[in-house]
Amino acid sequence: MSEAEGQHLEGLLDHLRDMVETARTMPMSASVLVNRDEALELISQALAGIPAELRHARWLLKERDEYLDTARREADELVQAARVQAERMVERSDIVREARKSAQQIITDAEAEGRRLHHAAEDYVDQRLAALETLLDKTMTGVRKGREQLQVDLPEAEETDDPDEVPVFDQDDT
């Protein structure tokens, strides 16, 4: 996911939080009025942005694999070239030894670079998923708080001796 997409996703979730926080309260209640369609649209847009994170992570892993394949091919080519050169210069064992050493060093370096890229890709994916997890946790907390604010606790109806008497709700008695 590009930084702009990440900011877009975060912006959508910030907008949803702001919408809940600034929603108009219902008279004589802690509940608020939230435009359901607008909130659901923001949530849908945020959810649609999540797969971009995964595509970016897959792209990083594919790039890493391609780099490792290229490095292995180059290393194989260098080893083959060293073998050919060694066969031509059998009498020069120092050259053959240096070629093998150089080829082995290239292989070692390519494997180390592959491991580094693999770890970097995993770290990046972990960081992005952690950020997404934090963002979703904040969103869920906001949604829970909003739902809690929407809950109205009504007192149980008091029993009266007169069946025609209708109980009256008085908010100040709660």
Image: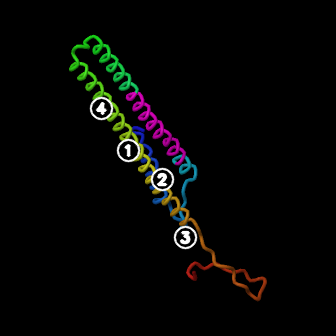
SS at mark 2 in the image: helix
Q: Nearer the viewer, residue 57 or 148?
A: 57
**Which mark, residue 136?**
2
Amino acid at pointer 3:
Ser
- The CA span between labels 1 and 2 is 20 Å
Image depth: mark 2 or mark 3 in front? 2
For disc 1, the marked residue is 123
- The CA span between labels 4 and 1 is 21 Å
Residue 174 on image: x %, y %: 57, 80
Residue at 44% from the left image edge and 31% from the top image edge:
62
Residue 35 on image: x %, y %: 55, 53
- The CA span between labels 2 and 3 is 28 Å
SS at mark 4 in the image: helix
Q: Nearer the viewer, residue 113 or 44?
A: 113
Residue 137 on image: x %, y %: 47, 56
Q: Residue furthest front?
A: 91
Mark 2 or 3, nearer chain start: 3
**Which mark, residue 109?**
4
- The CA span between labels 2 and 4 is 40 Å
Q: Within 10 Å of the Cα at label 2, are there few (<14), some (14-19), or many (20+) other Cα atoms?
A: some
Amino acid at pointer 4:
Asp
